[in-house]
Image (cartoon, rainbow, N blue to C red):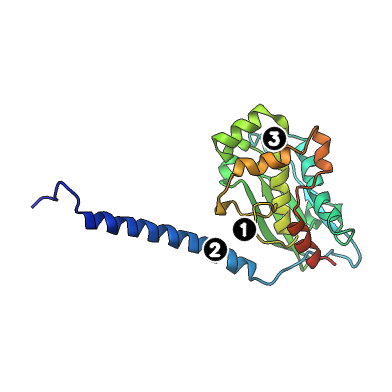
Amino acid sequence: MGMPSVIPPGWRTLNRRLVLMACATAAAAIVLAHSLVSAQRPFRLEPLEDGGAITYFIGEGKPGSQYRQSDRELARWALDAWARSTGGALRFAPSREQDALVRIHWANAEDGLYGEMRPISVNGRRGAEVFVRPDTDGLGNDIAGLARADPLMRDTIVYLTCVHELGHAVGLDHTDDFVDIMYFFGFGGDIPGFFKRYRAQLKQRSDISKVSGLSAGDIERLRDLYQ
């Protein structure tokens, strides 16, 4: 016997309920995951020598990654943004890769990520590897179009990605507040607008070194760790 040609009204109601339940479950999973991460014991980077600075290394991009030599400057400005926000409690200094507590690498499209932080151990101290993809085409048509039309938007995206992933490196978790640099995009919202908000504060590229992109909440959480 075949299926009825007209779906009974009760089935429609059931289907709607199932869809709503699935959406609610997915939303709850995101919130639960965020809560579990936030509940972890906070950590802070410690220099290899007492009273010293956090050592860092910035790698070179691979062919095909759309890496630019000037991206190294964006990464340094991102480190400076976090350091300035602690009033000197957190300091960074360049070093060789094997000695660096923080190592910044430029990811290729085939790496399957846009930004990521991975914890590492360096001479018994906690460190971090940060991966940033300088190819803005990986962020979808809307954002990619903005980046292609405006070089400062492209640099905005790469810079803010550096800041966000370095925020994880220094010990900060995601937040659900759209004004924070540590905001988790999984919560949704106007993602192109997230980048446009920062871009609107720039008149020229050098302004990036002065406009941190950090919110008051980002700074407060950072100072709680480094004081």
Alpha-carbon neighbours of circle 3 within 10 Å: few (<14), some, or many (≥20)? many
Is the residue under label 3 in contact with that under label 1 (CB below 8 Å)?
no
> Which residue carries the number 2 mark?
31
Residue under the image location 90 percent in, 59 percent down: 88
Residue 58: x and y, percent?
77, 46
> Which residue carries the number 1 mark?
176
Alpha-carbon neighbours of circle 1 within 10 Å: few (<14), some, or many (≥20)? some
Q: Mark 1 belongs to which amino acid?
A: Asp
Q: Secondary structure at mark 3?
A: helix
Q: Mark 2 belongs to which amino acid?
A: Val
Which marked residue is nearer to the observer: mark 1 or mark 3? 1
Specify the quadrant that holds the C terminus: bottom right
> Which residue carries the number 3 mark?
153
Rounded to the nearest whole Å, what is the CA distance between mark 1 and mark 3?
24 Å
Q: Quadrant of residue 60?
A: top right
Q: Secondary structure at mark 1?
A: loop
Asked whether, in this view, residue 97 is left or right of residue 148, the answer is right
Q: Secondary structure at mark 2?
A: helix
Residue under the image location 61 percent in, 66 percent down: 37
Q: Is residue 198 visible?
A: yes
Name the one closer to the observer, 137 or 130.
137
Residue under the image location 49 percent in, 63 percent down: 29
Residue 53: x and y, percent?
88, 59
* Count of numbered tags: 3
Residue at the far right in the pictured view? 51
Q: Is residue 61 visible?
A: no
Rounded to the nearest whole Å, what is the CA distance between mark 3 and mark 2?
30 Å
Lower position in the chain sequence, tag 1 or tag 2: 2
Lower position in the chain sequence, tag 1 or tag 3: 3
Is the residue under label 2 in contact with that under label 1 (CB below 8 Å)?
yes
Residue at the far left in the pictured view? 1
Rounded to the nearest whole Å, what is the CA distance between mark 1 and mark 2?
9 Å
